[in-house]
């Protein structure tokens, strides 16, 4: 169960859960094409001593991909999330659309969000892992550790998931929720019991605000191509049932790609979890991430 589930809130009023967590963030805006990229700085627990942790969400998403993790990870260190360009509350991505174009916007905002020259750790989920690899390469020694979480950008290893439906906005809410429940089952969560009202709400809101065609970039080799240019430690965390992963064998091939560049690269495969591993198995994910960052 997620931290939020244990608070006995999610099944009663997921909108209230989202609103309460959102209200606790400090919003920072940095330049993004013709507008602003929106970042969230989260309250840090007293005594937390770790380096800042930047979390990048996946395609058709927003910072809420990390909704089950922010409070727990903030016990250790400052946590910063963001809405990537063209997603969530951020302005449209710069043209021509490319991983490096999006990554440059993210990299360009780090001083304003973290403080000039501050070193940081970076974890990127799915499409955010692809973008995060390019950010890590641009940041050089400033990025201490780059953690890919169910990341895309592995070209031939990436499984293209079919069957996702885009609901007509004119449908009744219950029908839209039912379609998004099925979409989450197909792509995001292996254990159907974890498709709770909060997961459906955040997914529905995120998809409605998505303005970036991330799939062509996700199917590219952009992450693998970035690895030789990353000075940070690299690591991976994958759910073994990740719909984009190609099973354990496909995920282990990703581990081998990482270790071809850094033979000691930590790589954790989480049992009983799908693509959205940090929502489905948050406690296991938190432990894995802490080991990787230790």
Image: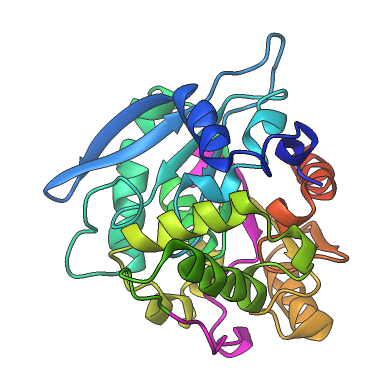
Asked if 25 appears above or below 133 in the picture, the reply is: above
Q: Looking at the rendering, which quadrant does residue 145 occupy?
A: top right
Q: Residue at x 72, y 86 (%)?
A: 246
Q: Is residue 119 visible?
A: no
Q: Residue furthest top?
A: 46
Q: Residue at x 81, y 72 (%)?
A: 240
Side (left or right) of 188 relative to 269? left
Q: Is residue 160 visible?
A: yes
Number of residue marks: 0
Percent x, y for residue 205? 42, 54
Return the residue nearer the eye: 115 or 183.
Answer: 183
Percent x, y for residue 61? 45, 57
Image quadrant in which the C terminus is located: top right
Asked if 262 appears above or below 183 in the picture, the reply is: above
Q: Residue at x 68, y 55 (%)?
A: 196
Asked if 52 appears above or below 164 in the picture, the reply is: above
Side (left or right) of 207 relative to 109? right
Q: Residue at x 68, y 35 (%)?
A: 9
Q: Which residues are magenta?
A: 140-165
Percent x, y for residue 241? 78, 75
Side (left or right) of 36 relative to 85? left
Residue 153 magenta-highlighted: yes
Asked if 113 appears above or below 195 in the picture, the reply is: above
Q: Looking at the rendering, which quadrant does residue 134 occupy?
A: bottom left
Q: Residue furthest left?
A: 34
């Amino acid at each position: 169960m997620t931290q939020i589930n244990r608070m006995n809130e999610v099944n009663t009023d997921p909108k209230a859960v989202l609103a309460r967590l959102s209200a606790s963030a400090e919003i920072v805006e940095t330049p993004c094409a013709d507008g602003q990229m929106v970042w969230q700085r989260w309250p840090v627990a007293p005594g937390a001593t770790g380096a800042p942790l930047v979390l990048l969400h996946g395609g058709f998403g927003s910072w809420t991909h990390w909704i089950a993790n922010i409070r727990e990870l903030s016990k250790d260190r400052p946590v910063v999330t963001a809405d990537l360009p063209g997603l969530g509350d951020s302005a449209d991505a710069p043209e021509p659309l490319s991983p490096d174009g999006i990554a440059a916007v993210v990299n360009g905002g780090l001083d304003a969000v973290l403080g000039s020259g501050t070193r940081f750790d970076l974890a990127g989920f799915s499409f955010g892992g692809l973008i995060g690899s390019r950010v890590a390469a641009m940041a050089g020694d400033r990025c201490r550790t780059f953690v890919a979480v169910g990341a895309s950008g592995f070209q031939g290893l990436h499984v293209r998931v079919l069957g996702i439906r885009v609901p007509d906005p004119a449908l009744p809410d219950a029908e839209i929720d039912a379609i998004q429940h099925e979409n989450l089952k197909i792509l995001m969560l292996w254990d159907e019991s974890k498709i709770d009202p909060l997961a459906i709400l955040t997914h529905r809101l995120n998809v409605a605000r998505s303005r970036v065609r991330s799939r062509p970039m996700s199917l590219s080799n952009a992450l693998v191509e970035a690895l030789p240019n990353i000075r940070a430690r690299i690591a991976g965390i994958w759910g073994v049932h990740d719909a984009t992963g190609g099973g354990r064998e496909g995920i282990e091939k990703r581990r081998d790609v990482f270790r071809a560049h850094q033979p000691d690269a930590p790589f954790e495969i989480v049992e009983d979890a799908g693509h959205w591993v940090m929502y489905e198995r948050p406690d296991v994910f938190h432990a894995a991430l802490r080991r990787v960052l230790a």
